[in-house]
Image (spheres, rainbow, N blue to C red):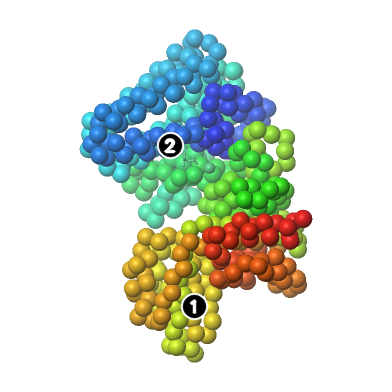
Amino acid sequence: MKVLKFGGTSVGSAARMKDVAKLICDGEKKIVVLSAMSGTTNSLIEISDYLYKNNTSGGLERINTLQQKYFDVIDELYNTPEYKSEAKIVLKSHFDYLRSFSKSVFTLFEEKAILAEGELLSTAIFQLYLQETGENSTLLPALEFMRIDKNAEPDTAYITEHLAKQLSMYPDTTIYVTQGFICRNFYDEIDNLQRGGSDYSASLIGAAVVADEIQIWTDIDGMHNNDPRFVEGTKPVPVLHFEEAAELAYFGAKILHPTCILPAKLGNIPVRLLNTMDPTAPGTLISTKSNSGKIEAVAAKDGITAIKIKSGRMLLAHGFLRKVFEIFESYHTPIDMVTTSEVGVSVSIDNNKRLDEIVNDLKKFGTVTVDKDMVIVCVVGDMPFENVGFQAKVVDALKEIPVRMISYGGSNYNISFLIKSVDKKRALNALSTALFN
Ligand code: ASP
Ligand code: MG
């Protein structure tokens, strides 16, 4: 069985939903995971914001505007009056539920329940449409099987068991439609897998049913070898190793949520990135296979801060790095890049919330320097250390650009550079010319 996930823009209008239906109805058994229609999750966040602030009329006004948008969609989506009126009843119950929150105290718990409505709506109207077209389909409630544990990590045993139970209730169904993003937490409350989490849902579902393949359908034809917003003539990368894809997803390729790779990788289930606007394009296949000895792609991550701690005490000392890292840990701030010398260490972080406290504590150990507005440029490919020439080529491409940190050897698949934001475009273009042209 395959798992196919369609993002918000792929189901962003009645016309796009019809396209998706055409794409998936081929008689093969599959699970289809949907995001909320594009813009909906943001609207729901805005609605919650009004309700947090006790602005009931503001919240209700936004709910009604959103409801009108959905009424327009169903008007266009269904062909028969029967289905139009059935869809109206479905919509009404969802929006009445949303309106009910204006009468109660509003906390994070209520907000999460509101956010879940986006995916509940998109899947409900889509599955109803499949039904109208005569397709053999079932709506599977993700809240019955998708679950996170105490640490907000997916409870894979629970997911596997309860998804199997749900599927076994409808053995003759061809297309199972379910919600991405939403789940229940350890306390059985409605929760979610964080923004962009529908990819993660698809990957967890794929792993749970040991799918033949997980397909992530978006609006571009796969992961590109460079950032199309800054470099002209980028191309989709046909084949990537799980680890290459994970690096790219984390370092900026927006097409895939970084968390999505792990469950697929652990279950050894290939992930294919495909384009709803061009369904026959090959896209990108992510699996255990890589093109050996090839540099595949370049990506950049913005908003990075570099912190250097220089200390005579580091010389020949042990335990110095641990003390430094512990400070970051105590402020729940993950470190991305690390480079060391005998007298100092530089690290990079992508979250400045606790920066002042971190710097203050680090001063116990040495002289601290902070550089903000930096970018990590990451070169991804199959680069085991026995191969020669890779670093030379990459470093040479950046010969005109001031480089703050370099990191290689953390994996066989990545070389990272920390540079100033102002140099990002120049760096991405220089690498493109040197590596791909
Ligand atoms: N609807 C959610 C969001 O906008 C999840 C997703 O689309 O992946 O973040
Ligand atoms: Mg997404």
Q: Which of 148 and 92 is in front in this view?
A: 92
Q: Give the quarter of the image for residue 99.
A: top left
> At 38% from the left edge and 43% from the top edge, which residue is drawn?
191
Q: Distance between the residues labelled 1 and 2?
A: 41 Å
Q: Which of marks 1 and 2 is in front?
A: 1
Tag shown at residue 364: none
Q: Is mark 1 on a helix, strand or loop?
A: strand
What residue is shown with label 1? 345
Ligand 1 within 8 angstroms of badge 2 C-beta: yes
Q: Nearer the viewer, residue 17 or 375?
A: 375
Neighbour class for label 1 at 10 Å: few (<14), some, many (≥20)?
Answer: some
Q: Which of 167 and 48 is in front in this view?
A: 48
Q: On screen, 120 above or below 203?
A: above
Q: Residue 335 at what x, y percent from top left?
A: 47, 66
Tag shown at residue 41: 2
Q: How many labels does the image show?
A: 2
Please name the amino acid that badge 2 sits on. Answer: Thr
Please name the amino acid that badge 1 sits on. Answer: Val
